[in-house]
C-alpha cells in the first residue's frame, strides 16, 4: 500500500486543506511495520481477518495528521455554531475519526461512500478541502453543495461521495443502488453505506440488505455504533445490539472503530469479500464526544466520567500518538508543532470561507428539475421571483 495512505490519490493542486495534509512528513519511511490490532475481530458467518496489520511510518504519520485535522475542524464547527455562523442542524464527528480515516486507507476513489448527516469528516477524507467544508457549514456559495445543503448534505461526486442524508436510514437503500450500478457495469469496486446504531432498526435497511444478498451486490453496510441513538442507549432500543449479526444470512464483522489500523484491515477485508461474494455488515464500535447534535449537551443520558474514560483509554488520535512515539517516528514536541500548524490551517480556512458570499436568491430554483425553471423578477424593486416550469 502506498505510504501516503489517506490522501495518496489526491492531486497536489487540490487544496488548501489537502496541501497541508500532504506536507512534509516527519518520517517518510516506507519500511513495513506490522502492528497488532487493539482487540480481536468478532465475526459472524465468516472467518475474521488477521489481527496483524501492515503499515508504514509514513502512513502512521498521515493517520495522525488527518485525524487531528478532522478533530480540529469539528471543534471549530462547534464554536462557529455557538457564534450563530452555522445555522440549523449540525452533527459533529469528533471521537469517530478512525472510521473515516481507516476506511479511506483501505479503498480507492473508485469505491463509493454514502452516509447519514454526521458527514463532515467523511467529506474531508474523500479529498474535500477545509474552505469548501466551512463554506457549506456557513451556507456560503463556495460550499461543496453551493451553500444549499448545510451540515447534513455534504457531497463530492468526483470522489464518489454521495452525501450526507438527513432521513434516518434512507441512505442505505441508496447505497445498495450504487452497489447495483457497480455490479451492472462490471466494476471491481464496492459501496460503503454508513449508518448509526439508531438507524439499525429501520425496516428499509433490512429490505435493502435482503435484495443485496439475493443479487450478491458489492454492498458493505457499516454500522457506526457510537452506543447512543440521539439520547437513547443502544440496549434500550435494540433487543439484540450485536449489529454485526443483524444480517442473519449475511456475514458480519465487529471492529474496534477507535483503532484506525483495525478499521483499515476490516474495510480491506470487507471490500474483497463484497466484490467476490456479495454484502457484508461491519459494526464499528466507536464513540462520539459531542452530543447527538449541537442542541444536545450530551451529558443528560451519560456521565461525564464515561466520556472522559473513553478519551483516556480509547481515543483514536492518542492511540496513534503512542504508536508514533513508541516507534520513534517523531518526538512529542514535533507532534505538538504539527497540531499547532493544523490549528492555523483551520483558522485560515474559516477566514477564507467567511469571505464567500451567500447564494443568490435565484439559487432557490436551481437543481430542482433537470431542465430547470423559468425564473422571472417582478415587483416594484424587481426583487421578487416567480418560477414556472418551461
Image (cartoon, rainbow, N blue to C red):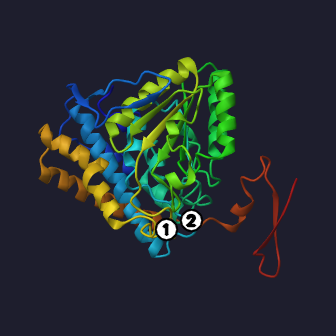
Percent across and percent down for residue 306 are: 34, 60
The kind of secondary structure element at disc 1 is: loop
Residue 10 visible in the picture: no
Report how far apart the C-alphas of labels 2 and 1 lie in the structure.
7 Å
Does the residue at mark 2 contact the one at mark 1 (Cβ under 8 Å)?
Answer: yes
Q: Which residue is mark 1?
A: 294
Residue occupying the point 33% across, 48% down: 67
Residue occupying the point 29% across, 34% down: 37
Q: Judge left or right: residue 314 versus residue 120.
A: left
Percent across and percent down for residue 206 are: 66, 37
Q: Judge left or right: residue 246 versus residue 388.
A: left
Residue occupying the point 75% across, 75% down: 383
State the residue lying farthest toward the bottom: 380
Residue occupying the point 37% across, 31% down: 41
The disc at residue 89 is 2
- Label 1 crowd (10 A; few <14 / some 14-19 / many >=20): some
Percent across and percent down for residue 129 are: 44, 50
Q: Nearer the viewer, residue 312 or 303?
A: 303
The part of the image, by quadrant, that contains residue 309 is: bottom left
Q: Nearer the viewer, residue 293 or 186?
A: 293
Tally of numbered discs: 2
Which quadrant of the figure contains the N terminus? top left
Amino acid at each position: 500500500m502506498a505510504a501516503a495512505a489517506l490522501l495518496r490519490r489526491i492531486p497536489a493542486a487540490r487544496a488548501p486543506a489537502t496541501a497541508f495534509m500532504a506536507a512534509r512528513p516527519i518520517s517518510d519511511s516506507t519500511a513495513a511495520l506490522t502492528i497488532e490490532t487493539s482487540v480481536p475481530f468478532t465475526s459472524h458467518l465468516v472467518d475474521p481477518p488477521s489481527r496483524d496489520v501492515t503499515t508504514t511510518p509514513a502512513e502512521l504519520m498521515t493517520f495522525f495528521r488527518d485525524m487531528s485535522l478532522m478533530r480540529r475542524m469539528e471543534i471549530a464547527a462547534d464554536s462557529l455554531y455557538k457564534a450563530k455562523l452555522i445555522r440549523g442542524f449540525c452533527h459533529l464527528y469528533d471521537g469517530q475519526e478512525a472510521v473515516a480515516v481507516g476506511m479511506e486507507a483501505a479503498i480507492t476513489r473508485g469505491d463509493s461512500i454514502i452516509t447519514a448527516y454526521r458527514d463532515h469528516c467523511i467529506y474531508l477524507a474523500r479529498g474535500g478541502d477545509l474552505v469548501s467544508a466551512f463554506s457549506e457549514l456557513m451556507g456560503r456559495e463556495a460550499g461543496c453543495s453551493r451553500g444549499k445543503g448545510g451540515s447534513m448534505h455534504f457531497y463530492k461526486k468526483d470522489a464518489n461521495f454521495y452525501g450526507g442524508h438527513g432521513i434516518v436510514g434512507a441512505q442505505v437503500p441508496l447505497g445498495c443502488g450504487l452497489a447495483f450500478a457497480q455490479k451492472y457495469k462490471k466494476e471491481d469496486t464496492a459501496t460503503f453505506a454508513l449508518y448509526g446504531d439508531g438507524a439499525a432498526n429501520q425496516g428499509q435497511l433490512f429490505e435493502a440488505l435482503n435484495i443485496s444478498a439475493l443479487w450478491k451486490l458489492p454492498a458493505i453496510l457499516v454500522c457506526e455504533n457510537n452506543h447512543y441513538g440521539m439520547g437513547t442507549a443502544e440496549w434500550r432500543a435494540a433487543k439484540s445490539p450485536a449489529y454485526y449479526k443483524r444480517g442473519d444470512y449475511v456475514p458480519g464483522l465487529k471492529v474496534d472503530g477507535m483503532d484506525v489500523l483495525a478499521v483499515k484491515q476490516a474495510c480491506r477485508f470487507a471490500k474483497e469479500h463484497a466484490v467476490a461474494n456479495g454484502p457484508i455488515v461491519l459494526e464499528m464500535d466507536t464513540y462520539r464526544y459531542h452530543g447527538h447534535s449541537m442542541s444536545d449537551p450530551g451529558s443528560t443520558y451519560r456521565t461525564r466520567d464515561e466520556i472522559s474514560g473513553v478519551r483516556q483509554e480509547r481515543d483514536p488520535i492518542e492511540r496513534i500518538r503512542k504508536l508514533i512515539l513508541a516507534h520513534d517516528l517523531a518526538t512529542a514536541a514535533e507532534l505538538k508543532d504539527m497540531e499547532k500548524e493544523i490549528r492555523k490551517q483551520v483558522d485560515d480556512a474559516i477566514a477564507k470561507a467567511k469571505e464567500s458570499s451567500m447564494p443568490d436568491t435565484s439559487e432557490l430554483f436551481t437543481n430542482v428539475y433537470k431542465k430547470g425553471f423559468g425564473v422571472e423578477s417582478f415587483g416594484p424593486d424587481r426583487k421578487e421571483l416567480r418560477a414556472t416550469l418551461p
